Amino acid sequence: MKPTNVNKLLKDFSARERLKTRIDADGTLIAPGKIGHIYEYDDHHLGVMVMPSTPRKNYWGVTRAKLLSLGCVVLQDGDFEGAAYFDPSNAEQSKAAIKAARVCRKRRLSSAQIERQISWLRAAAGGTL
């Protein structure tokens, strides 16, 4: 079983950066993205896995160079995919990792948007909400 402070690290990071999280098939908490995901690496670092569904050699090469220039450490270096770990307290590294895996952020709704959506739901439900 993984230490609870590692789970707390990813939960705090995802809350601060407004990232969606889910439990992976093997029971690991991840922040899924369109091209990869962010996961727990150790007590003080998070990892980013870049795995495009179709081979995109240039994407990983450019992403790897960007992560290395910011001080991230590359763990796996394949032809089309790879992994690196980064410090979640470093804003530049965090931004690059989120962009590399193309992780979507949670939307923030204004109170006017929330009220408008509630009124649409009430109208669709026949006023029973």
Image: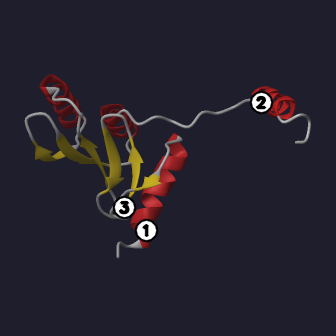
Q: Residue at x 50, y 36 (%)?
A: 105
State the residue position of label 2: 117
Q: What residue type is labelled 3?
A: Thr
State the residue position of label 3: 28
Q: Nearer the viewer, mark 2 or mark 1?
A: 2
The residue carrying pointer 2 sits among few (fewer than 14), some (14 to 19) or many (20 or more) residues within 10 Å by Cα, namely few
Q: Nearer the viewer, mark 3 or mark 1?
A: 3
Q: Residue at x 46, y 34 (%)?
A: 104
Check the image and name the residue furthest to the right. Answer: 127
Q: Nearer the viewer, mark 2 or mark 3?
A: 2
Q: Establish if 117 lies above or below 48.
A: above
Front-lying residue, 1 or 55: 55
Taking 75 as reference, is 108 left or right?
right
Q: What quarter of the picture does the C terminus occupy? A: top right
Check the image and name the residue furthest to the bottom. Answer: 1
Q: Which residue is drawn at 56% across and 37% down?
A: 106
Taking 114 as reference, is 70 left or right?
left
Mark 2 and mark 1: span between their CA atoms? 37 Å
State the residue position of label 1: 5
